[in-house]
Amino acid sequence: MTYDDSFLRDILKRSRVIAVVGVSPNEVRPSYYVARYLSLKGYRVIPVNPGHAGKRLFGQEVRASLAECPKDVDMVDIFRRSDAVPEIVDEALAILPGLRTIWMQIGVMHDGAAEKARAAGVDVVMNRCPKIEYQRLFGELRMGGFATGIISSKL
């Protein structure tokens, strides 16, 4: 799927509380460093992983499920296999009244669940990483020598 940069930028600007489903406490796992990065950028990151419930990551208690998350979660970032997505989306739609975005990580896609979320008025991003998109759209990749295609007057 392709997404307009303004669509992705809007999601990243408006989101405040992100539940990261499938986050690992292992610092070398992509889910850990993506969630940590987002927390360092000012997002409140709620880690969700039943195998590590009760531990603390990024200043927050790890939750066993979305049902245990604060109700002000406005974005769910999914680090699970694609076949797990429908159940996660169903739970998120049922219990998170402020949900505005379902974001599926690189390699994670489920058209049926995405359509259900969109029908409920929730934006969906599939097969993308919010960390990479944040860095690309807000000029941070340029510092590493990557051509982002974004023109800016920042130095």
Image (cartoon, rainbow, N blue to C red):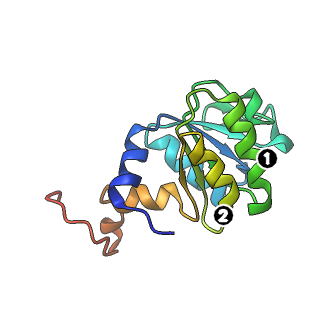
Q: Residues within 10 Å of mark 1 (few under 14, many from 20)?
A: few
Q: Where in the figure is residue 102, as x and y percent of width and height?
A: 59, 47
User: Observer-nearest residue: 25 or 132?
Assistant: 132
Checking the image for residue 109, the label placed there is 2
Q: Where in the figure is residue 36, as x and y percent of width and height?
A: 56, 47
Residue 29 appears in view: no
Residue 37 appears in view: yes
| Residue at (70% x, 28% y) in the render | 95
Q: In terms of secondary structure, where does tag 2 sit? A: loop
User: Can you identify the residue that label 1 sits on?
Assistant: 87
User: Where is residue 81, by image quadrant?
Assistant: bottom right
Q: Residues within 10 Å of mark 2 (few under 14, many from 20)?
A: many
Residue 93, above or below 151? above
The residue positioned farthest toward the left in the image shown: 153
| Residue at (60% x, 26% y) in the render | 97
Q: CA distance from mark 2 to mark 1?
A: 13 Å
Of callouts 2 and 1, which one flags the residue occurring earlier in the amino acid sequence? Answer: 1
Which quadrant would the C terminus be assigned to in this image? bottom left
* Residue type pointed to by label 1: Glu
Q: Where in the figure is residue 147, as x and y percent of width and height?
A: 31, 75
| Residue at (75% x, 37% y) in the render | 91
* Residue type pointed to by label 2: Met
In the image, 62: left or right of 114?
right
Mark 2 touches mark 1? (CB < 8 Å): no
User: Observer-nearest residue: 9 or 64?
Assistant: 9
